[in-house]
Image (cartoon, grey):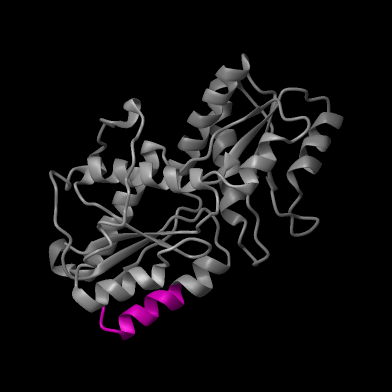
Amino acid sequence: MPQLVLAVHGSADPEAADTIARLAALITGLGGIQPLIGHLDVQRPSLADVLARLSGDGRGRGLEQGLDLGPFEAPYANPSPDPYAAPYAGPERAGRGAVVVPLLLGDGYHRHIDLPATVAAARADGLECALTAGLSGEVAVAFSLYERLRAAERRAGGKADAIVLASAGSGRPGGTDGAVRAARQLRQLLGGERGPVPVRAAYCSSTGPDAPAVPEMIERLRVSGHRRIALATHLLAPGRFTRALAGTDGAWAVSAPLADHPRLAHLVLRRYTAGRLALTPDLAA
């Protein structure tokens, strides 16, 4: 079995590490494989360090001891398996090679520049390494957004009359396509439940007139007569962007970030399956 490696952005916020640890625990509970975590920025170990250790000894001894999975909430302790998780019947020991799954909702610099370069360097060092697609635009993300939004609405005591899908933003052409697609998918999910409701994508880091900032989009919706404007947090883990969203004027409700949602754990396992088959195509025969 190749080692599953989660490539995460990294954050100085300790709650971000706790959230990713809960995701890792979910993945282990569902799939019987303990992921390693490599960071693209801010935190250690870096993804390059994780892959270097794997290429050096085949299993990354010592990294497992450095991964604190931490506690996770009771509702997630026994997540319901979906059909795609069927190949994961019990604990597995990681073996030769690695499958890197980017925990990224966008298609910006990390996904297309430094992450592929890091994987290419590991391959040059002799590590059999598959790099999978990220999470951008996946239906599982939209369902996770929907369920987190509904939880936020219940806490606020009603239903939103407009939604701002709050994403990080990207200066790279096409880097926000996943957010736009997620907004469209969320609008479809909400429309099936309550009829037409506006869902607009906006960004914590605005990159121009076609990528409005979150406060700007809230103001546009308020001018249009909306008052219960909810923020659907299209972010994986707590950090400076989620803190900013929590304090945004005019936001009636703000949903929690997504990384520790069970649907994303299932999605990561499906990505791992695809990467594993790419490394060992005979398994697909």
Residue 89 is left or right of residue 189, and the answer is: left
Most distant residue in the right direction? 223
Front one among 70 and 117: 70
Q: Does the magenta stretch include residue 119?
A: yes
Front one among 67 and 22: 67
Residue drawn at the location 30% of the way across and 84% of the way down: 125
- Picture quarter containing residue 124? bottom left
| Vertical relation: 283 (above or below) 251 | below
Residue drawn at the location 65% of the way across and 55% of the way down: 169
- Where residue 227 sits: x, y (%)? 77, 23
Q: Main secondary structure of the magenta part?
A: helix
| Vertical relation: 19 (above or below) 59 | above
| Vertical relation: 19 (above or below) 223 | below
Instruction: State whether residue 128 appears in this view.
Output: no
Most distant residue in the top direction? 157
| Vertical relation: 98 (above or below) 138 | below
Residue drawn at the location 16% of the way across and 65% of the way down: 95
Instruction: State whether residue 44 appears in this view.
Output: yes
- Where residue 163 sits: x, y (%)? 67, 32
- Where residue 29 sits: x, y (%)? 23, 40
Front one among 192 and 114: 114
Residue 190 is left or right of residue 28, and the answer is: right
- Where residue 216 sits: x, y (%)? 81, 43
Which quadrant is home to the N terminus?
bottom left
Q: Does the magenta stretch include residue 77?
A: no
Q: What stretch is highlighted in magenta?
A: 116-127
